[in-house]
Image (tube, helix red, strand yellow):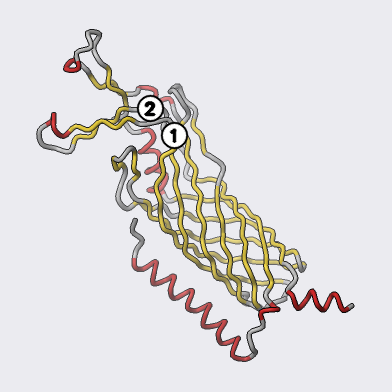
Amino acid sequence: MRISKTVFRLTAILIGFFVATASADAESSFYEKEHIRGFISIGGDYRNMNSEHINYINRLLFSSGKGVIQESASGDSSDAKFVGDGSLSSYDHFDDYYLGLHVNIGAQYKQFLTWFDINFMPTQVSEGSGATDAAWFAYGADWMFGWKLFGENTFINLIPAAGIGFNLLNLHFVNSYDILNYDGGALEDQIKVTDMRNRYYSTFAMTFNAELELRLSFDPISIGIYGGYRVIRYGEIDIEDVEYGSADVNGDTFFLGARLTWTFLSPWQKKQRDRL
């Protein structure tokens, strides 16, 4: 998998900004681990895929060239022929949007936040006349770094954040195909037959995620709306040791959503409460 040098440089700049700002704050007051507050949040968002992203999925699932090897009645392998799957045209192609679901687990120290964004989605299904339904889903996680621009405890806050992670795209084909691959040269030497199984096939990608959240705090509960952009670069997908698809697919997504966050008391706050 490849992710551009620009993405890595941007990630390093943004993370460096957060760390440097946090360090500057730490110089004015000693680091106090008892003031760290853990938090957990749940959220959902509308995600719109780059056209190359959804075309990649639809091309792999519904393009021609999928079928089975059909032998002659006599059983003579020399008379066998490849029969394409005509049922593919009965399936609706997938749309370029989906619902993203998220669970965030992290910690806050003053204005600095860091968390793991665990993301997943409902399985997208297309029904047709084939043996099974076509389906796909994705899941992943990003390690995020954020900063509360308007202070630690203000009612209204803006929180820019960025991070890196991974994503796993999973595809289920509509039949157990014998897929022919011709690499050139002598035909009898170069044809490979892939016996596809009734299972999900996956491809892994690195990610870069950037977002901006507008948050209203009713401590310990806060409500936020957020939007951003997630950079994903998918590679070829391995189907029974044969690579399909493209080497560098733009899987980027825009997103807009809302989240509910619960921030726990710090050890210091618990001590103050117990003294009352």
For the residue pair 184 and 153, the one nearer the viewer reads as 184
For the residue pair 2 and 71, the one nearer the viewer reads as 71
Query: Which residue is under mark 1?
Result: 199
Q: Residue at x 55, y 46 (%)?
A: 121
- State the mark number for residue 19: none
Residue type highlighted by circle 1: Arg
Q: Residue at x 40, y 54 (%)?
A: 205
Question: In the rendered image of this protein, does residue 234 appear above or below residue 216?
Answer: above
- State the mark number for residue 176: 2
Q: Residue at x 35, y 44 (%)?
A: 237
- Res. 80 image quadrant: top left
Q: Residue at x 70, y 78 (%)?
A: 35
Q: Which quarter of the rendered picture does the N terminus lie within? A: bottom left
| Mark 1: secondary structure | loop
Residue type highlighted by circle 2: Ser
Estimate the x, y position of residue 230 in percent, counting from the top left: 47, 59
Q: What residue occupies the far top of the structure in this picture?
A: 74
Q: Earlier in the sequence, mark 2 or mark 1?
A: 2
Q: Which quarter of the rendered picture does the C terminus lie within? A: bottom right
Estimate the x, y position of residue 163 in percent, counting from the top left: 50, 66
Distance Cα–Cα, label 2 vs label 1:
9 Å
| Mark 2: secondary structure | loop
* Residue neighbourhood size for the residue with mark 1, other residues' Cα within 10 Å, grouped as few (<14), some (14–19), many (≥20): few
Question: In the rendered image of this protein, does residue 245 appear above or below residue 25?
Answer: above
